[in-house]
Amino acid sequence: GENVEQHPSTLSVQEGDSAVIKCTYSDSASNYFPWYKQELGKGPQLIIDIRSNVGEKKDQRIAVTLNKTAKHFSLHITETQPEDSAVYFCAASPLTTGGYNKLIFGAGTRLAVHP
Amino acid sequence: EPEVTQTPSHQVTQMGQEVILRCVPISNHLYFYWYRQILGQKVEFLVSFYNNEISEKSEIFDDQFSVERPDGSNFTLKIRSTKLEDSAMYFCASSDLGPFRGIGKLFFGSGTQLSVL
């Protein structure tokens, strides 16, 4: 089955710096790669996603890149702010025939943005 | 903004007792899921549900687990006889079909923290 590895497990940056989180996946059939942000006491919140027919997607300060050949994808946050501090999860969704999503998550990255 | 709501936020139970975790998915969504997260570990898929039946379940989802959509709005997870290792945060999620079959965006609730003593 699919396995998703995520690095680093913790990341500390100064406000205004960029943060990069990287994930690799094992199943070449995976075709959907969302990123979730989880704040303390809350559920995972979808922040950006990318599909396998796209190499890069950007939404304001957040961007995601996908390299299908190497089976890795990355989250880039520019101009970080203290409110970006949270745990970030990458996920991969193997192709299903049932029309639903089965997300396989990475272990998470705890991002701390220091003022 | 529509959201997935879960109740209760915390549930404490004795080993061997039955628990029911409740969820109200986003109203126009068609697919419903349960995931769980043991403290410090990955978020893990448990089960997906569509058209009043289970679409797929993981190895974790054994005979002690069941899901139900008793009416048009609620989606429940029942654990018949809880074990210590069932202690975890349980997340409900829902998705619509999306523009590409099988790639609807998942939206998660805030979770129910289950503690089995």
Image: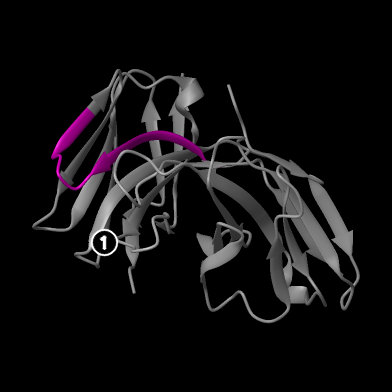
Does residue B41 appear in the picture of this structure?
no
Circle 1 Cα neighbour tier, 10 Å, few/some/many (<14 / 14–19 / ≥20): many
Look at the image and give the residue range highlighted in magenta. A44-57
Query: In the rendering, at what x and y percent does residue B111 appear?
Result: 68, 47
Residue B48 at x, y percent in the picture: 53, 61
Quadrant for the N terminus of chain B in the image = top right
Under circle 1, the secondary element is: strand
Q: Quadrant of residue A25?
A: bottom left
The numbered mark 1 sits on a residue in which chain?
A: A
**A55 to the left or right of A88:** left
Q: Nearer the viewer, residue A40 or B55?
A: B55
Q: Is residue B18 above or below residue A38?
A: below
In this view, B9 is above or below A56: below
Q: Is residue A45 magenta?
A: yes
Magenta segment, prevailing SS (helix, strand or loop):
strand
Give the quarter of the figure containing the C terminus of chain B: bottom right
Query: On the image, which quarter does residue B109 sit in?
Result: top right
Residue A37 shown left or right of residue A52 in the figure? right
Furthest-left residue in this view: A69
Q: Residue B70: say if magenta.
A: no
Residue type (three-letter) at the residue carrying disc 1: Tyr
Q: In this rendering, does residue A13 appear at all? A: yes
Q: Residue at x 24, y 44 (%)?
A: A51
Which residue sits at x=34%, y=47%? B103
Q: Residue at x 37, y 40 (%)?
A: B98
